[in-house]
Image (spheres, helix red, strand yellow):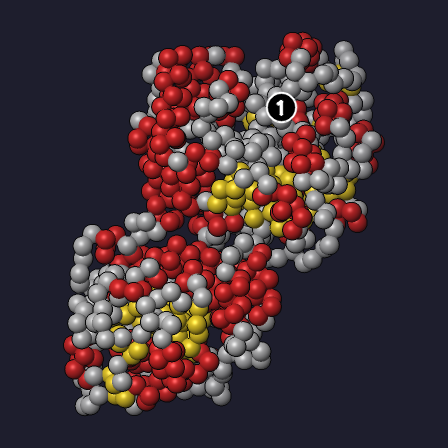
Amino acid sequence: MNHVVVVDLGYGDAGKGTVVDWLCATRPVHTVVRFNGGAQAAHNVVLPDGRQHTFAQFGAGTFRPGVRTHLSRYVVVDPLALAAEADHLTSVGVPDALDRLTVDGDALLATPYHRAANRAREMARGADRHGSCGLGVGESVAYGLAHPDEAPRVADCRHPERLRRRLTLLRDRLTAELGPLDAPPVADCLPAFTGFADRVRIVDGTYLAGVLRAGTCVFEGAQGVLLDEWHGFHPYTTWSTTTFANAETLLTEAGLAGSAQRLGVLRTTTTRHGPGPLVTEDPALPFTDPRNPTNPWQGRFRFGHFDAVAHRYALAVAGGVDGLALTHLDLTGRPDSPAQRAPGTGCPTDGGPAPLRICRRYDTLDRLDPGPPGDLDRQAALTARLAAARPVYDDGPPTDWVAAVEAALDVPVTLTSHGPTAADKIARSAQVAGQLVAVPG
Amino acid sequence: MGSGVWSTDVYDAAKRYRKATGKSAFSYSDSGARTVHTALDPKGATRESRDSAEHPQSTPIAVLFDVTGSMGTVPRTLQAKLPQLLGLLQRQGYASDPQIMFGAIGDATCDRVPLQVGQFESDNRMDDDLGRIVLEGGGGGQMMESYELAMYFMARHTVTDSWRKRGRRGYLFIIGDELAYPVVKAREVRDRIGDRLAEDVPIRQLVDELTARWDTYYLLPAGSHYSGNRKVLDFWRGLLGQHAVELDDLDAVCETIALTVGLGEQAIDLEQGLRDLERTGSAATATVSKALARLDGGRGAQVSTLPFTSTGRGSGVTRL
């Protein structure tokens, strides 16, 4: 099986969704497997006919008929957001998304109590926000670590009494710690969770191994390696392992260790939504991203020049890749890809080629070395150094972006993206091209 | 790093899952209604499947099911699996612009609501029609239901652009487990549908009229009251030949319909269809395979000689 693992080597928003959609459009994919994060993911997919969906919990291949989604035990599952997402998929012509979904019963649930606690904490941080999405994913992970045997899990939705007990305990603990929470009573929450269990196929840990033997799977990472819980720039990180590690664990459990192709995704402009280091940030860059509006939890979407220093660090932390998917090449104004495209993601507002450059070193340091996982003091020190670092640009905008990125990172670019849809992708290696079939639509 | 795009409201979510599982889908019936909903009343009605700019090549598919006692779970199963049916038809490209109509069949001799017919819809408004069906739950106990009345309606009170413009028959699926009455009674037609017939119509004659314009199938699920009784199967085989199909598992009804249409449209062969089912995660492959094995092989939608000119007040309905 030609399994592929897709991971973002930046701060998220590089284009994992569109890459996963392209993979599912160009080969028979059995299942898209999610292996980190939760409902806070926002993977945008646009079809050539204009239909669009922001994938949060469903795999970004769901527009392709028959492609299933599996939420592994590493995902924090939010059944409430899932229902709304399924409704939107129905409205854009995908009525059977819930029928094509399986969820590992061991996965943690995100509940209204986690969400309320998450917001209460983030608000208490005032100006020192971490950039949380306010959906309670981190809160759910934290509670799961503190109370592994009492944390509400997906399988509990099939046992209303057990779920009621666990939700009540959760609510009482969080209320004791934070004061009254802005969340509905437990009795009101139960129908939503049991309704989810009635509708969605809940499976055990052995299910995935069968799927991995049944057909090609695409592992879809959420967020980005630079936000990783252990290797990101503390405290501006997510409660999630964003590297290949979880996917590799799942493959190993199925007896398929090391068999999957590792595909890193990067965007020609390094972006960040939320606070934290973004050394190459340049407010003068003429970009907007309609899919990432300013929101009360993360603030403004930030654009920077291509930060090769940070991306080399991400590559080292992630243990390397077999190839890169480089997206948003239409932003670089190459003659073969007009900068002024149909409304999609991240068009230059003035229509002209962007003066995007590549940063290969900072003024105070030219490389970031990964440390051992778990040393958050070290990561916080790194964050402080980054906050003081200034980008150095040795040359002007590259003329050949693909060659420049390959040289800066010493990794082959195997897929390029020049626009929002699967049809705007070009495979640069037979390995990534896989078994090519016509792109539908 | 993403954002919270989708609503996390508990009340919305509960409602959405209820809708998706069909729990309150039959709210009209579940609320105690015992008369036909105005939207489904066959009296003086014509049901149309029309082409539009959005759906230029409409394929009409009518699904009428027995709602009496022994068959009470059929509509609920249909409702829960409707997304799969639509998904298979549309996304696998089994039929161009499918427009689906649901209806319910009872017993005109003793039921309050012997015939209910929805409209042809190409989106989830068909869901609404399902929700308005009264689940009678009675039945006469004489191994007969008024299937003939439903077939009369389909033969004389439907208009499809598929037939008028392209000479292509639509698909009609009747799901039940009993016999039809031997004649369409003029009095019942007058009371329920409104037409004034000079005399009763023998069922054989009606079936000939119906099958000229509707590729008609009778699905007889196993586990239903009379399914083991050869008399029922023999009766429908006599009327419809191999289009009387036995179904091991009622849960496979949507998949069976989708594949039958796909076979009829020559969009797939049985093997391809079963592969598609497997890909969508359906558990119904074995049942469907068994049920449809007889239908496979070179049997396509039947097309009349074009140009087809409609008759009967321009409605395309052929009067006897």
Residue ID at (39%, 30%): A162
Choose top left, top right, bottom left or bottom right for residue B293.
Answer: bottom right
Whether residue B239 appears in this view of the structure is yes
Residue ID at (30%, 78%): B179
Quadrant location of the C terminus of chain B in the rendered image? bottom left
Question: What amino acid type is highlighted by mark number 1?
Answer: Leu
Residue ID at (60%, 68%): B271
Quadrant location of the N terminus of chain B in the rendered image? top right
Choose top left, top right, bottom left or bottom right for residue A188.
Answer: top left
Residue B270 lies left or right of residue A403; in this view the side is left
Q: Nearer the viewer, residue B256 or A183?
A: B256
Q: Chain of mark 1?
A: A
> Which element is circle 1 on?
helix
Give the x, y percent position of residue B133: 27, 61
Q: Label 1 crowding class (10 Å Cα cut-off): few <14, some 14-19, many 20+?
A: many
Give the x, y percent position of residue B205: 32, 89
Q: Nearer the viewer, residue A18 or A79?
A: A79
Q: Is residue A251 above or below residue B131?
A: above
Q: Is residue A23 above or below residue A183?
A: below
Whether residue A416 appears in this view of the structure is no
Give the x, y percent position of residue B218: 39, 75
Residue that mark 1 sits on: A227
Q: Is residue A260 above or below residue B264?
A: above
Give the x, y percent position of residue A52: 52, 46
How many labels were placed on the picture?
A: 1
Residue B88 lies left or right of residue A411; in this view the side is left
Q: Nearer the viewer, residue A377 or B317?
A: A377
